[in-house]
Amino acid sequence: MFAALMSRICSHSLVSPGRPLRWTIIANPSAGGFTIKSRWKSHHRILLDYEQKAAALNPGRPDSGPSVTARELDRGGGHGSGGAGSLGSCGLLLTKGPGDGAKITRALIDEAGADKPLTGGFPFHLLITAGGDGTSREVLSVLYQAPPITRANFAVLRLPMGTGNDGADAQELDAALGLLIYPVKIEYQRSLHLITATAGKGPFPAFNILSVGLDAFVTHMTNKMKGRLPGDSYKLWVDIASLLYDRIYKVGPMDVRALDEKGREVKAFHEDVLLLAVGASGHRTYGSRKKILPDDRNVCALKQMSLFRKVALKELFNTGDHIDKPESIPFSAHRVEFSGHYPILAQMDGETVLLQKEDFPAAIELSEPVIPVLKLLNRC
């Protein structure tokens, strides 16, 4: 049902008008947007609504269709093997485990590199992810490495079908689907990279928020306990981390130096840092929409604080009001260099890595704008 509805919506899409459109939908069937019954019922209603809206607003595109990759890689699981009625014939490919999203994206990039001109020009590829932040990170990590001439023939749409959806292009499914049926433009977003002093360790990419410290510990424990705890275990581990983090990881002094795009120093400090979060831009959330970066500034550091203050500030992340508290150090930077004396966890859009003393100095750096995403044009 999801595949057929998305296929019909895409066949009326306004993405890249005047060029043949090829779409590929990479979905994680274990994502909460599919497996949580109440969410799927809501999503199903929205999909039906947007199928009707798409057909009413826009003519069908005879030049559009699923990618060759989707048709050829689908092994059906009872749906056939790329034939009529298969998921691939609708442009949908399901992931079955870590790395599948990356493999599909690599095949799609190979297809785009071999594209031949058709009536209306070279095909334009619409790459849609339907899962959580892990699925989109896999896909974007591969697309980031594609040749610029190939990326110029792509656009990405990240549907909010996971549990947190902090990296999605809209918080709600209807707003995301609006990017398919209303006039849009292509904009390029930056990515983030964690660079360490250890050869061969990194760089590690992220596309929403890259951070070190307390929240990376929360992410690490959430990943370890995923499937064992009911509900949103991230929220549970936020509470537990407030009690345990300082006993497992020593919070010590950290030297932090921030640079702008021209390499000029914009901030430097020596503090006991509890958390250091860097976003691909400002106005970013993580951990199920916690507003760690609530304004235009793309960096927030938090100084070490007492347990009482941690408990008091915890709820302020829901509103972004933590940014004005004395423990917060918010600023904007293109590159943030940091060095400490103790091991510390880092997280990249939900994936974690442990940094050891020999990995310092480390840095979190923004890339050039490279990820093509859809943005609504102003509508009268």
Image (cartoon, grey):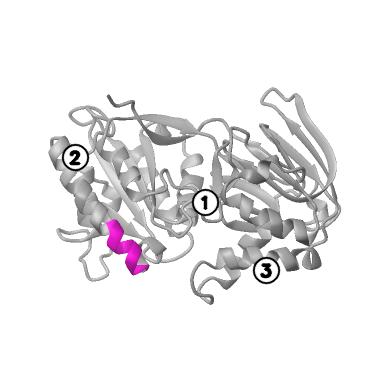
Instruction: Say if 267 sits above or below 89 in the image.
Output: above
Q: Is residue 40 magenta?
A: yes
Q: Using a 10 Å C-alpha cutoff, classify the residue at mark 2 as few (fewer than 14 neighbours), some (14 to 19) or many (20 or more).
A: many
- Asked whether 360 or 299 is in front, the reply is 299
**Which residues, given as a range, are shown in magenta?**
36-43
The residue carrying mark 2 is 12
Left or right, residue 287 beside residue 240: left
- Locate the N terminus by quadrant: bottom left
The residue carrying mark 3 is 240
Q: Give, as a three-letter code, the residue at label 2.
A: His
Q: Give, as a three-letter code, the residue at label 1.
A: Arg
User: What residue is at 68 percent from the left and 61 percent from the top?
Assistant: 217
Label 1 vs 2, first from the N-terminus:
2
Q: Secondary structure at mark 2?
A: loop
Provide residue 157's location: percent of width, then percent of height: 37, 43
> What separation in Å lies between label 1 and label 2 (alpha carbons)?
31 Å
Label 2 vs 3, first from the N-terminus:
2
- Asked whether 97 or 284 is in front, the reply is 284
The residue carrying mark 1 is 289
